[in-house]
């Protein structure tokens, strides 16, 4: 399909109904160059999210805005993945790229049901890469996580920091990065030009929501992550007390420090990664591995602000945005937490043109606007 006379490149977005996925879908639509095809099993997301994406696109682009498509399938069923790829084979251009966000992502839970985490996160990625190979899809952006660094030696963390995850979830992300590296290397050895090119984007802590108030974080059940929890507490949707998991860390106020970045900055980082993959075909300087025979076309980038903020800083920021007076209790440390994860974002800035420009106040006011506009989230 096309928009303003330009044929759109189809991008398969797995997990595109999720918090980050839906913001990636909106960012893709708004370029007017990409058409998101979403696959999601709705395990932790609602189809309503895609309707909101389409609504935002129409608001900003007019009635002829590209319409995203949805296939409700599970990555544990390879034949269902195959069927989606086959469907687009017959249509001009097929699928141009895959942005792979679908995964189970709770660090604590991953230690309780590791086999499910490996089945979905690693098995699902292998099935996806197999279908890509079969259908000649050569561009891949993978949703990875700062958690692959475990407890890093250097802060802010450069991409050269060793991949040494300390949780099952983190290990699944590290493994998929290794699988992508090897798939890219095998193709460059076999095909040379036209080989698979893959970017792993290592997220720090996404927060906030699209400024329209129509799109946000809507996990099933009580949020595990700090920011959505603070928003739901301030709106009265969650009644339980706020527990701060430890204030005896080696950090300025004793609570954990994280690199929070606006989810729209993160989402736009995915568009920049796809644009870099596209340009790398004609501009060999871009995305050129140091030694293709050794590394293939695989690169990893941190997506963060490079600014660390503590749990107490975030509670204070959400107090300012919502006016809610948080009462919190300091309790013991949470299993799997590390003292600080702050990005060194200079490589993504240099190679992808990535800049996380939105500030803490925008994250909190945009999050609060979504919460107040959707007291029950995506449930009507
Ligand atoms: C932030 C800080 C908590 C809740 C996780 C995953 C990571 C990525 C993002 C998938 C921590 C503290 C939290 C609460 C608290 N997920 N906290 N009380 O753990 O940095 O990252 O989500 O990619 O892989 O690990 O984010 O929001 O859970 O916690 O004190 O009720 O807030 O201890 O220090 P985290 P988070």
Image (tube, helix red, strand yellow):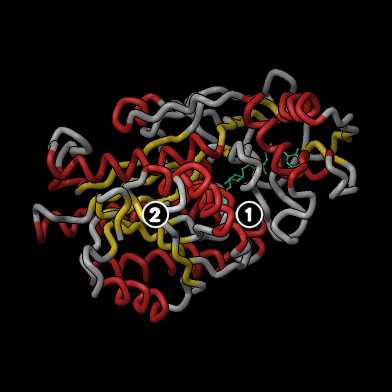
Q: Nearer the viewer, residue 129 or 151?
A: 129
In this rendering, the answer to whether 39 lies above or below 320 is below
Q: Position of residue 325 (x, y in %)?
A: 89, 29
Disc 2: which residue? 99
- Image mark count: 2
Q: Nearer the viewer, residue 362 or 141?
A: 362
Left or right of 100 in this view: 240: right
In this rendering, the answer to whether 4 lies above or below 350 is below
Q: From this viewpoint, which residue is outermost toward the bottom?
A: 79
Q: Position of residue 26 (x, y in %)?
A: 48, 48
Left or right of 246 in this view: 92: left
Q: Position of residue 327 (x, y in %)?
A: 90, 33
Left or right of 314 in this view: 352: left
In this rendering, the answer to whether 74 lies above or below 315 is below
Q: Residue 279 occupies which quadrant of the picture?
A: top left
Q: Quadrant of the N terminus?
A: bottom left
Q: Nearer the viewer, residue 62 or 204?
A: 62
Q: From this viewpoint, which residue is outermost toward the front?
A: 63
Q: Residues within 10 Å of mark 2 (few under 14, many from 20)?
A: many
Which label was assigned to residue 179?
none
Q: Residue 12 occupies which quadrant of the picture?
A: bottom left
Q: Ligand 1: does it lie within 8 Å of the C-beta at label 2?
A: no
Task: Give the mark nearer the N terminus: 2 vs 1.
Answer: 2
Q: Residues within 10 Å of mark 1 (few under 14, many from 20)?
A: some
Q: Ligand 1: does it lie within 8 Å of the C-beta at label 1?
A: yes
Disc 1: which residue? 106
């Amino acid at each position: 399909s096309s928009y303003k006379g330009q044929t759109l490149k189809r991008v398969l977005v797995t997990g595109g109904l999720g918090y980050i996925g839906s913001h990636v879908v909106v960012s893709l639509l708004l370029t007017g160059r990409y058409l998101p095809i979403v696959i999601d099993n709705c395990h932790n997301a609602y189809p309503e999210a895609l309707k909101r994406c389409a609504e935002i696109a129409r608001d900003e682009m007019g009635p002829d805005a590209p319409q995203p498509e949805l296939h409700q399938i599970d990555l544990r069923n390879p034949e269902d993945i195959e069927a989606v790829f086959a469907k687009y084979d017959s249509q001009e251009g097929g699928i141009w790229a895959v942005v792979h966000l679908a995964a189970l992502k709770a660090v604590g839970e991953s230690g309780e049901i590791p086999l499910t985490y490996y089945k979905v996160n690693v098995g699902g990625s292998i099935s996806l890469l197999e279908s890509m190979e079969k259908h000649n899809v050569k561009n891949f952006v993978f949703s990875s996580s700062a958690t692959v660094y475990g407890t890093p030696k250097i802060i802010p963390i450069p991409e050269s920091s060793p991949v040494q995850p300390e949780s099952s979830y983190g290990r699944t992300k590290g493994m998929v990065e290794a699988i992508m590296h090897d798939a890219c290397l095998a193709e460059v050895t076999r095909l040379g030009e036209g080989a698979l090119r893959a970017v792993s984007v290592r997220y720090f802590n996404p927060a906030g929501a699209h400024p329209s108030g129509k799109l946000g974080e809507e996990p099933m059940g009580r949020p595990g992550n700090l920011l959505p929890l603070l928003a739901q507490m301030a709106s009265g949707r969650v009644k339980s007390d706020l527990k701060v998991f430890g204030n005896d860390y080696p950090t300025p106020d004793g609570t954990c420090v994280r690199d929070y970045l606006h989810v729209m900055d993160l989402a736009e980082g995915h568009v920049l990664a796809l644009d870099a993959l596209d340009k790398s075909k004609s501009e060999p300087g871009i995305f050129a591995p140091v030694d293709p025979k050794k590394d293939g076309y695989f690169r990893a980038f941190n997506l963060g602000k490079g600014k660390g903020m503590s749990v107490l800083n975030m509670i204070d920021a959400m107090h300012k945005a919502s006016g809610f007076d948080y009462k919190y209790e300091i309790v013991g440390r949470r299993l799997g937490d590390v003292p600080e994860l702050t990005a060194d974002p200079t490589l993504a800035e240099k190679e992808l043109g990535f800049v996380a420009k939105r500030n803490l106040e925008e994250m909190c006011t945009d999050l609060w606007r979504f919460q107040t506009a959707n007291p029950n989230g995506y449930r009507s």
